[in-house]
Image (cartoon, coloured by chain):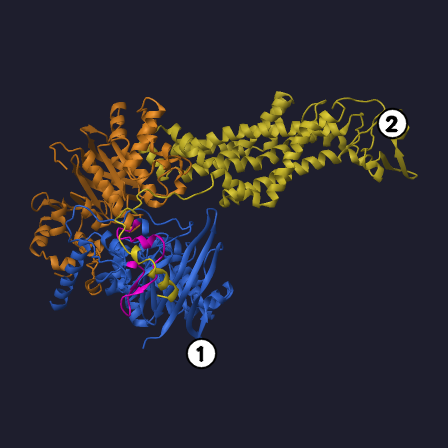
Amino acid sequence: MDKPLNQIIQNKVADFTFVGQKNIKVVDEVYEEDSYWKQLFKRIAKNKGSVFGFIMITLIAFMALLGPVISGYDFDEQIAGHESMAPRIPVLENLGVFDGSETLKTSTGELVVNKYETIEGGEEVYHWFGTDVLGRDLFTRTWIGTRISLYIALVAVIVDVFIGMSYGMISGYYGGKVDNIMQRSVEVLNGIPNLVVVTLLIIVLKPGLMSITLAIAITGWIGMSRVSRASMLKLKESEYVLAARTMGAKDISIMYKDILPNIFSQLLIMSMFSIPSAIFTEAFLAFVGIGIPVPMASLGSLISENFKSLTTHFYMIVPPVLVLALLMLSFNLLADGLRDALDPTMKEV
Amino acid sequence: MKEKVLEVRDLAITFNTSAGKVKAVRGVDLDLYKGETVAIVGESGSGKSVTTKAIMGILSNNGTIDSGEIHYTFEKEGEEVTENLLNFSKKQMRKTINGKHIAMIFQDPMTSLDPTMSIGNQIIEGMRTHYKTKKKIAQAKAIKLLELVGITDPKSRMKNYPHQLSGGMRQRIVIAIALACDPDVLICDEPTTALDVTIQAKILELIQDIQKKIGISVIYITHDLGVVAKVAEYVNVMYAGKIVEKGTVDDIFYEPKHPYTWGLLLAMPDLETNTEKLVSIPGNPPNMSHDIVGDPFYPRNKYALHIDKEIEPPLIAVSETHSAATWLLSEHGPEYSLPTELQARITRMKEEAKHYAAG
Amino acid sequence: MQQANEPLLEVKDLKQHFKVSRKFTVKAVDGVSFKIYPGETYGLVGESGSGKSTIGRSVIRLHELTDGEVLFKGKDISKKMNKDTERVLRTNMQMIFQDPMASLNPRKNVLDSVAQGLDIHGLYKNQAERNERVLEILERVGLSKEFAGRYPSQFSGGQRQRIGIARALIMNPDLIIADEAISALDVSIQAQIVNLMKEIQEETNVAYLFIAHDLSMVRYISDRIGVLHLGHMIETGTTEEIFSKPLHPYTKSLLSAIPHPNPIIEQKRTALSYDYATSGLDYSEGSLHNVGGTHEVLGTDEEVNNWLNKYSMKEVIGVR
């Protein structure tokens, strides 16, 4: 024993007596831990990409709600005389950009034109994203379009989660013949190209908000069911599931009360990845002409309409394209971050 | 005079986890001599596995070495050198030490073997990496190793895959792989826990045989005192990141001095005792993310002293080989006697030992 | 530990065959019979592949039975059960599992996990009663009431196993099947759990089917023991009978494999080895012979006589 310790205990000689078992702690300590959600949050916050994605999504959603309100125009308001006007933004115009002028290429050379100067009362008119060929304010239309796109995507994915999750869980839980039949049917369904299914559906049901949402939902649930079935197969032999069975719990109760909370994270990740896919499918449908009917706008229909002016007034197509790209990128980044935080084994999905 | 092969001094390791900083090892001294078998005994959370992982340089990324030195004596380019392993980078450890000089085998033979590689390839992998041995020579050596670990018909086994073998055979293969590069030290982390009882003894006897033949030094990590009784020469009992008693195997089994060691010995049901109740240690191992004041065994110690609450006891020597970290041994300590059941058991064991030696 | 005349559980010639492929069927359990009386502990011992876990799970009807009969409290639970029989089974027979990490639902707090049985069968009038009973049981198994709101990841292995015991105990069962319930725990915690189980048995007269591979613990807790190997019950009897006069070579090798906590002896002796393939025995040919009291051994007449005549304890233990 070293000297300093020796000296300390010289003073405490009286303490070398038995405590008499009063020290025995039968009641144990519990290991402190942050709650499940807090831990999750911390892990996601570490991933810069997902933080960026989350912020972007919030911003875009915010603008989708607020944008059409603050612009001062209606989305389907065709203002005569305001056709094909370049973007003009109040403060920035003083810096030389977005001042309402555009450079047109004519057969004789380049020509700088500013329609705001030619129309009546043009000084007071502002179109932050410009206008399209029918004189509708693009700012308003872009954000209305975002609203519709987001709505379709979210509804489609939610329906997918419910159908796919239940289908996969039932198929995985019962196994054997039930599983066989269910999976073979799904494979047949999956064999039909998505686009064909969607196109046929829309032709039958006539294009409209509901029919498009339905069409996207019908083709998207299969991926969800696969994830749900795989998780179910993994978990159904767990001892806590066996414990529930030994206590006589009904199958449905086991599926939804015991197993579902444990596969919830997988489903969340999968749905986060499905959203950009749904948005894109809708955009694609609009682009090929079977999307949202006029005068409603979605990001895809906006791109489709303004595509025609790509070479003449290219500014028209930029806002919807940017928003679409940012939206898809942000959801992918957020989903990536969620997946890394929740379940590193899902990297192949 | 035996040469010292491995010397660990004052090792302290902390892990950064989501529950806070966990001081897994709080000051460990360990010695290993050539050809010796040392056992590190402890339960979950004692820090025994972490200590050996630090020796091998395979601590997980969130672990940091707070202090300490690990001096390893080995032959480098024909010369005998002693170096501090903690100064080696991970790459250096892989190139010079791991497999070549210090090898490790783990608990579960099912997950220790690569399911997609044949047995033969797994054994020669190390040789080819470290020594660039030619394939034919390596294969011949692999067959010899399989014979050494008691595998029948080694030539055809070379082409087998792990899933075609039983648990006991797999563990033998794991040992063969560990020995492939002629290491000086073998660390076995609970090598028999996942095996059937009838196989356990066989594997331990196998390692003992190999030790006699090749002269390697072995460190066993285990929570099973039966394993310790069978194979160890020197024993370190760990609790809450520190060694609480160390001594020869006879010291620990016939003259245990620390109340935790008493508890461990009593928790093994004896075929002789007809008691109605097993004497058990109350409570649970401590939460290592909290700072420890005083003796960490205090809340479970029926023999606790008031001073245990304030000051952690240092290792107090009982003999040249034997020391224990308990204030009961200090000169100021009170009169005490071992628990009656343990006393009875030790007396009986000494009697049996005499009879066995005689007849 | 009373011995009533009516057995609580009766297993008759249980067979469990699992079809692995068209040609190959694994005969996990091949004709096992035993009885458990109220309030006693029956130890079922065997190594991996012996079929002991399969028997436990078959008795509690986690599997369909290939063949054989299981009677619980006089009712046949081996075939399709009507609602009443099912209820009797599910409320009076409970199970404790091996892996404390996996036996609790990670997303359920302790209160909900322990009360699961009560919830399923609606055994309480209101929430207050339910919670009260859970807290009572938690205290009984040595856990603080404060633990009720926590999640499994915050507990150690031993604590989780206590929660598993609480979950089984709250149903007031007549029979608890402990499927390797202590194998995954630290040695000092094993002793705690075994003591707890014994106390509970004294208080409630519950019977245990204690499935294990560690003979030394089994000896401590069991009244009667059955030794399993490759799906057959090769020896059975009271703990005393089995440990004082093991006859079957497999039983002898199991006993021999138990380590002595005596280094001087342990280092010098070698355990008996036994290999079915080279032993010359065929389990399917043997039948159970009574060799005294309730002690029974599986073998042909010739083999059993052989073992009785050549019996030597020294061979088993290696000393004494």
**Position of residue B212 in the picture relative to residue B97 (left or right):** left
**Residue at 72%, 22% in the rendered image:** A295
Above or below, comparing residue A168 to residue C154 in the picture = above
Q: Quadrant of the C terminus of chain C?
A: bottom left
**Position of residue A315 in the picture relative to residue C48 (left or right):** right
- The three-letter amino acid code for the residue at tag 2 is Gly
Chain in orange on the image: C
Mark 2 crowdedness (10 Å alpha carbons): few <14, some 14-19, many ≥20: few
Q: Which structural element holds mark 1?
A: strand
Residue C101 locus on image (x, y percent):
37, 43
Residue A315's quadrant in the figure?
Answer: top right
Magenta stretch containing residue C251, yes or no? no
Magenta stretch containing residue B319, yes or no? yes
Q: Which residues are magenta?
A: B300-327
- The three-letter amino acid code for the residue at tag 1 is Glu
User: What secondary structure is the stretch in magenta mostly built from?
Assistant: loop
Chain in yellow on the image: A
Which residue position is annotated with label 1?
B79
In space, the residues marked 2 and 1 are separated at their CA atoms by 92 Å
- Tell which subunit mark 2 falls on: A
**Position of residue A6 in the picture relative to residue C84 (left or right):** right
Which residue position is annotated with label 2?
A122
Mark 1 crowdedness (10 Å alpha carbons): few <14, some 14-19, many ≥20: few
Asked if both marks, 2 and 1, belong to the same chain, the answer given is no
**Position of residue A255 in the picture relative to residue A188 (left or right):** left
